[in-house]
């Protein structure tokens, strides 16, 4: 299954064609590089099924309705609470059909069901949405009163941090040195948890000594106990997998690091390296830019405080 979908523009008219990247790499496995659209079954076992695409499409419907990304679980709570006005994009200023909005919200709710078998089929999606297409298409630039040929502002080039630079070069040795020096400064721990970290300590020793197979074993023990979620452990195990030529496992661990710490630049950088190893160069470049943007935001916040 290959879904290469994106948002692009023709003569100033945007075309929606992206709800997360899920595609088979050369090893035949499936990946998603956008956790905002990732179905629960993928995070659970790393597998993608046809119903996974329906879940991702449901998140797109929510994005279109709200004008922002709302975590699916929160959106479902709002839907169950019948808070339609809170869910809808405030820029619409209430100028929408409540009946049509209710139908689309209901459809999104069906798409976001936890159990894949409870989601609608593609055919049902098309039939439901086709009934709502009662008006001719209006160019988005006309609807939004935006000049069609207005020049988009170019994104300024950011200087890369040492970690980002190392990731862009796929320099695993440099990445290893940086992660060793960073230790666990981005993890949240309590004193009660520190007595339960023997497996992690053993993994850290092996990681520092570049015994990556042993580090994977100990880090896996720590993760499987499931006492606490450590993004740093996932990032370190991801690098161990890269040194062991297991790019698919490296990517999954980097994604789990992002799940544990959604705004952590290191998680994005590690995904970038794994994607590069999987010959997904465009996606790797996107991840590197996202990580750099998050790092710049973090630095601005630190300077402001």
Image (cartoon, rainbow, N blue to C red):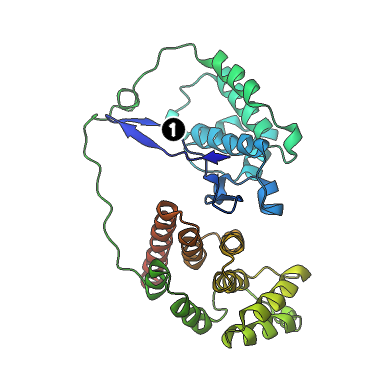
Q: Position of residue 296 (x, y in %)?
A: 37, 65
Q: Callout 1 environment at 10 Å: few (<14), some (14 to 19), or many (20+)? A: few
Front position in the image: 41 or 12: 41
Tell me the SS state at disc 1: loop
Examine the rendered structure and indicate whether residue 199 appears above or below residue 136: below
Residue topped by disc 1:
16
Q: Position of residue 175 (x, y in %)?
A: 47, 76
Number of numbered callouts drawn: 1
Q: Quadrant of residue 196?
A: bottom right
Front position in the image: 278 or 34: 278
Q: Position of residue 9 (x, y in %)?
A: 33, 33
Q: Looking at the rendering, in which quadrant would you find the N terminus?
A: top right
Front position in the image: 123 or 89: 123
Examine the rendered structure and indicate whether residue 205 appears above or below residue 281: below
Q: Quadrant of residue 91?
A: top left
Q: Looking at the rendering, in which quadrant would you find the C terminus?
A: bottom left
Q: Position of residue 258 (x, y in %)?
A: 56, 60
At a point 68% along the width and 85% down the height, the residue shown is 201
Examine the rendered structure and indicate whether residue 91 appears above or below residue 280: above
User: Does residue 48 appear in the picture of this structure?
Assistant: yes
At a point 68% along the width and 47% down the height, the residue shown is 40
User: Does residue 81 appear in the picture of this structure?
Assistant: no
Looking at the image, residue 5 sits to the left or right of residue 104; the answer is left
């Amino acid at each position: 299954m290959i879904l290469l979908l994106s948002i692009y523009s023709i003569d100033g008219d945007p075309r929606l064609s992206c709800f997360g990247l899920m595609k088979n790499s050369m090893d035949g496995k499936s990946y998603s590089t956008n956790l905002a659209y990732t179905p629960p079954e993928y995070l659970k076992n790393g597998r993608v099924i046809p119903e996974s695409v329906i879940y991702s499409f449901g998140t797109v419907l929510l994005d279109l309705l709200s004008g922002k990304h709302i975590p699916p679980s929160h959106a479902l709570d709002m839907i169950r609470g019948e808070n339609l006005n809170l869910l809808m994009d405030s820029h619409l200023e209430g100028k929408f059909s409540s009946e049509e909005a209710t139908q689309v919200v209901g459809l999104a709710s069906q798409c976001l069901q936890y159990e894949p078998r409870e989601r609608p089929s593609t055919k049902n999606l098309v039939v439901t949405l086709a009934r709502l297409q009662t008006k001719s298409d209006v160019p988005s630039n006309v609807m939004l009163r935006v000049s069609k040929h207005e020049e988009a502002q170019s994104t300024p080039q950011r200087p890369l941090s040492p970690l980002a630079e190392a990731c862009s070069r796929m320099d695993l040795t440099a990445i290893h040195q940086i992660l060793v020096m960073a230790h666990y400064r981005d993890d949240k721990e309590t004193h009660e948890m520190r007595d339960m970290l023997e497996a992690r300590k053993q993994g850290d020793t092996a990681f520092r000594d570049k015994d990556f197979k042993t580090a994977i074993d100990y880090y896996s023990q720590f993760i499987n106990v499931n006492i606490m979620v450590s993004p740093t452990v996932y990032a370190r195990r991801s690098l161990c997998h890269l040194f062991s030529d297991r790019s698919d496992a490296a990517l999954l661990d980097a994604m789990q690091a992002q799940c544990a710490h959604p705004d952590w630049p290191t998680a994005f950088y590690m995904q970038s390296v794994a994607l590069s190893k999987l010959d997904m160069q465009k996606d790797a470049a996107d991840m590197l830019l996202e990580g750099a943007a998050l790092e710049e935001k973090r630095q601005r916040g630190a300077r402001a405080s």
